[in-house]
Amino acid sequence: MTNHSQDNLLDLAKDFAQQGQKQKAIDSLEEALRMGFDLKIALELSKLYRQTGQEDQAYAVIKTVPDLFSIEQVLDEYEKVLAANHYLIEALQVRNLTQGELEFLVEPAKPSEQRTIMQQFRSSKAVTLSQYQELFKLDLPTYLAFAQSVLIDPLEDSTVKVALTEDLVKLGREEEFTITILGQNHVFVPKEVPMLNQDTVYKEVITAIAGKFHNRPSELPLYLAEANFALGKLYPCQKTFISNPDAFAKDLLNFLQKKPAYSYQKLLEKIYSKNAG
């Protein structure tokens, strides 16, 4: 629910929009949204962003909406935003995640733009979020082939591999993909893989670490971040490497504190090696 100041800014934005001063309307809505999230403001802002060629900003706003599927007005704006951005891959993920109930009409980018997107991705020393999201503009065969080439690259950052793997999971792909983990190739089927934070090994490791710091909560975020880093290096094949999550959690903490890690010492050395792929 909006407060009085937000209501005034919303009314002001509507006046600006009717006068054709869309940037001033956007400025008013941005200020209103900074005061606190409100669905009416978010939808109006997303619409104005689209109308002024700022579809990437529209995407950022619509993705702050907690539920994209239950309200028709939200669903309609979400589809328009995906279409404006040419985010075909995300539209296909929606179709899979809703078991075909939602079919968004989204076209991929032109072939020339797709080639540019892939070239820029490959030439980047550190992939940004915006560069990663550009991959959603690829057509499906191109996306799948490009994803496979990135997953098998031993030099690619593991966070990118985690993101790509999870996006393949969201697509529900049933074919095999090969991924290079710590210098070795492993095969997985996305449809048979959970998201990283839903995996049983992940949950058990995180729970074990959290239990160790229940009396030292200020230290917990640091060690949880390290656990996410280590498990991300092994995803989606962590079960291949970790047979005892509790022991792995204990060894990880020992390793980080410069103590003997026993069972998982060699694995942790590989994970934290500068050349770990």
Image: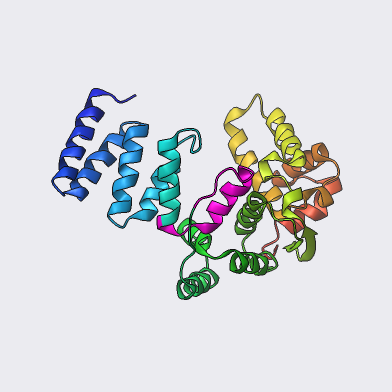
- The C terminus lies in quadrant: bottom right
Q: Is residue 139 left or right of residue 44?
A: right
Which region of the structure is painted magenta? 84-104
* Foreground residue among 67 and 261: 67
User: Number of numbered discs present?
Assistant: 0
Q: Position of residue 122 (x, y in %)?
A: 55, 71
* Foreground residue among 276 and 200: 200
* Foreground residue among 215 and 95: 95
Q: Is residue 62 above or below residue 7?
A: below
Q: Position of residue 83 (x, y in %)?
A: 43, 55
Residue 91 part of the magenta-drawn span: yes
* Foreground residue among 105 and 41: 105
Task: Identify the residue at horizontal 61%, vertical 42% (top origin).
Answer: 98
Residue 64 in sight here: no
Q: Position of residue 85 (x, y in %)?
A: 42, 57
Residue 43 in sight here: yes
Task: Identify the residue at horizontal 45%, vertical 33% (top origin).
Answer: 71
- The N terminus lies in quadrant: top left
